[in-house]
Image: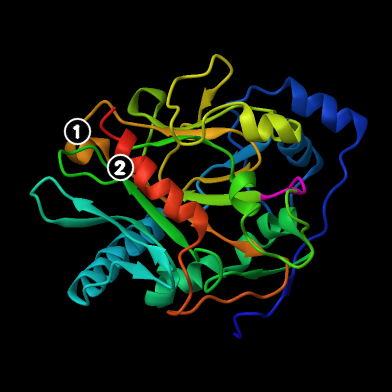
Amino acid sequence: MSPDVMVDSPPRTEPTAAEVEEALALPLTTRFTLDHRINGVQQAFLDAHGFILFAGVAAPAEVETILSDLDRVQKTLLDDGRTEINGIPLYIGEDEDGQPFIQRFAFTSLFSEKISAFVRDPRFLPVRGLIGERTRVGEGERDGVVFNRNMTVEGSAYTRLGWHTDGLRDLFILHPTWPWLRPPGPMLNVGLHFDRVTAEDGGLRLIPGSHNQGFLSMLLRKPYFLSHRPDRNEISIETEPGDLTVHDGRMWHRVERSPWTGTRSLRRTMYVPYLVDAYQPKSEDSATPFYHRLSSPLDRFTRAG
């Protein structure tokens, strides 16, 4: 399939008043089931809180297949001496044995037919419908399919990530329909999770409802990437292998470092870009975006703090 092909997805379901009331009564820890379309209660939950979790979207065998192929991709990239892909840096740290360990992959599916087929699977059409009625998989755009592996060891390059919104990042993406410093529209991050992660294990923290904040709050509420301090309104997103989350990138979120070390601290997530805007492929000649030049040194500066 051509990379710029747009695929039809189920249209947005407009929640009824009763469905909104039902959604608001649900606990924030609700684990939903992904069906052939997003129902009104699920849509209302996402609209209100800015995130939603679907349980067991990937089967255990699929989880193992993807993780196994990721090891192969790492070997290929390390053997080739790659430090970046299409202008996007790879975060390369060390594992428990002091061996090179890629902790943030970019454009992962370009190196894996199995991952590419997985992210294009029809089961994700309802999720893609949350983003637009016609979407494509941005495998060669922005950062492509990103795979994160947070792990706490002495040589780690990626143990946590400070408070931020993705809205600031998108201000630096030059898009012809976006005037400079115009508040970004809705943006949804689709993530697959590959480990059991509880609140005590660290992991994703969100401030529910913060996707509805004003532009100044998006810019100034917290020092981007520098702040790791818990927020009284934050919640922890607890996951099981195969879970899928959707969260609005305009909301404040961070990744808490695991208190454990080694394999027990490992948290693996894959983020898939489903896009609706103009096709903008990257190439090996692409420049490193400003937000990566900024966030990478800040992460190195703060990760020991």
Residue designated by label 1: 261
Circle 2 SS class: helix
**Residue at the (68%, 59%) spot, across then down:** 128
The crowd level at tag 1 (other Cα within 10 Å; few <14, some 14-19, many 20+) is some
Provide residue 283's location: percent of width, then percent of height.
48, 79
Q: Residues within 10 Å of mark 2 (few under 14, many from 20)?
A: few
Residue extending furthest top?
232
The residue at 63%/53% (across/down) is: 170
Q: Quadrant of residue 131?
A: bottom right
- Is residue 185 in the magenta section? yes
- Front-most of 117 and 134? 134
- Residue 300, numbered circle: 2
Toward the bottom, the furthest residue is 2
Q: What is the three-letter code of the residue carrying label 1?
A: Thr
Q: Is residue 61 left or right of residue 246?
A: left
Residue 230 horizontal/vertical position (percent)? 46, 19
Start-end of magenta stretch = 182-187
The amino acid pointed to by label 2 is Arg
Q: Is residue 230 left or right of residue 208?
A: left
